[in-house]
Image: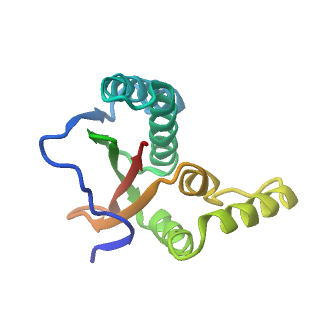
Amino acid sequence: MTIHFGDIIFKNEPTAFGNRLQLAEGPIDLNWYHCSVTSEFLGEFFALRCGATNMDYNEARHSIGYLVNELLENAIKFRAPGDIVIETTLDENHFEVKVTNLINVETSDRFQPLLAELTSRDPGELLIERIEANAEDAFSSGSGLGLLTLMSDYGARLGWRFSPVAEGNNIRLETFAALDFA
């Protein structure tokens, strides 16, 4: 059964400026380095386009890079073996990204309650609560601070779709995010 949280409907037209990257599972393990290199590339790739449409180049580069980096870090940190696909589009001043990867059932079961809370409460209030909780417990993890920062400070609209795959004990996770630039 497919389950979703948040905003999973993209608005950009099929003719929007975009690309698709695949980080392939292989002899070179996917790691944190791939997050920063990929997010910096995509930030620059789309910021150049933003500059042509009178949007602030630096704001676009930073915001897109930060958004993609956060989503990729989560995909790499929590993934089951397999490729990670990043699909991105820019239409006027509206940027969208979808990151697709596999996770195991146990990870899915731990992640879904967090997403239910993140998508049902005010992100600014929840961000403050989580920062305070993390300050009290130095060993806490999985609090969603990165996602909450995207929602609260960057105005990102986020969504997640969990879909079973035919074979194995894995779930296909699609993470959706959108940003608007002034």
From the top left corner, tell me how far across and down residue 178 is, in percent. 38, 51
Does residue 94 appear left or right of residue 151 in this picture? Answer: left
Q: Which quarter of the rendering shows the N terminus?
A: bottom left
Does residue 28 appear left or right of residue 149 in this picture? Answer: left
- In this orientation, which residue lies closer to the viewer: 164 or 154? 154
Judge whether 33 appears above or below 84 on screen: above
Does residue 81 appear left or right of residue 89 in this picture? Answer: right
Judge whether 180 appears above or below 116 on screen: above
Q: Which corner quadrant of the image does residue 159 belong to?
A: bottom left
Q: Which quarter of the rendering shows the C terminus?
A: top left
Colouring style: rainbow
From the top left corner, tell me how far across and down residue 4 is, in percent. 35, 71
Please count the marks in the image.
0
- In this orientation, which residue lies closer to the viewer: 67 or 143? 67
From the top left corner, tell me how far across and down residue 22 is, in percent. 28, 35
Identify the residue at horizontal 56%, vertical 74% (top origin). Answer: 117
Judge whether 170 appears above or below 113 on screen: above
From the top left corner, tell me how far across and down residue 121 is, in percent. 58, 74
Identify the residue at horizontal 40%, vertical 57% (top origin). Answer: 103
Residue furthest to the left in view is: 15
Identify the residue at horizontal 53%, vertical 32% (top origin). Answer: 32
- In this orientation, which residue lies closer to the viewer: 92 or 171? 92
